[in-house]
Amino acid sequence: MISERYRFTEFRWGEDELYDLEADPDEWVNLAGRPEYAEKVKEFKKEIAKAVWNDKEG
């Protein structure tokens, strides 16, 4: 999921990824595990949970 400033990826297994595209356009520093970004990660996870996904049968 991409916003104006951030790119967030949620994985079923492994570490989630959050990048500040303004400060780190090459996406070198994953912010997802930092406590100061916990609320931002939570917000993105809520948005992803609301998404409607296409499946092969639908």
Image (tube, helix red, strand yellow):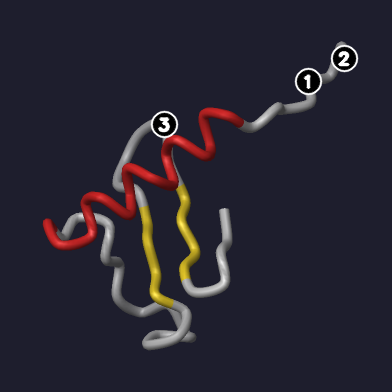
- The residues tagged by marks 1 and 2 sit, at their Cα atoms, a distance apart of 5 Å
Front residue of 5/27: it is: 5
Whether label 1 touches label 2, CB < 8 Å: yes
Which residue is the site of mark 1? 55
**Which badge, 2 or 3, comes first in the chain's sequence?**
3
Describe residue 53's horizontal placement relative to residue 19 as left or right.
right
Given the current orientation, which residue lies at the most extreme top position? Answer: 57
Q: Residue at x 42, y 39 (%)?
A: 45
Of labels 3 and 1, earlier in sequence is: 3
Which is nearer the eye, 41 or 15?
Answer: 41
* Residue at the limit of the structure toward the right, as seen here: 58
User: Which residue corresponds to the image point at 27% horizontal and 57% vertical from the top-left?
Assistant: 32
Amino acid type at image mark 2? Gly
> Marks 2 and 3, Cα distance to the nearest angstrom?
22 Å
Q: SS of the residue at dot 1? A: loop
| x, y percent for residue 25 | 48, 86
The answer to whether residue 14 is left or right of residue 10 is: left
Type of amino acid under label 3 = Arg
Residue 31 screen position, x and y as percent: 26, 65
Q: Which residue is mark 3?
A: 12
Residue matched to label 2: 58
Q: From this view, report whether residue 49 is shown above or below residue 56.
A: below
Q: Residues within 10 Å of mark 2 (few under 14, many from 20)?
A: few
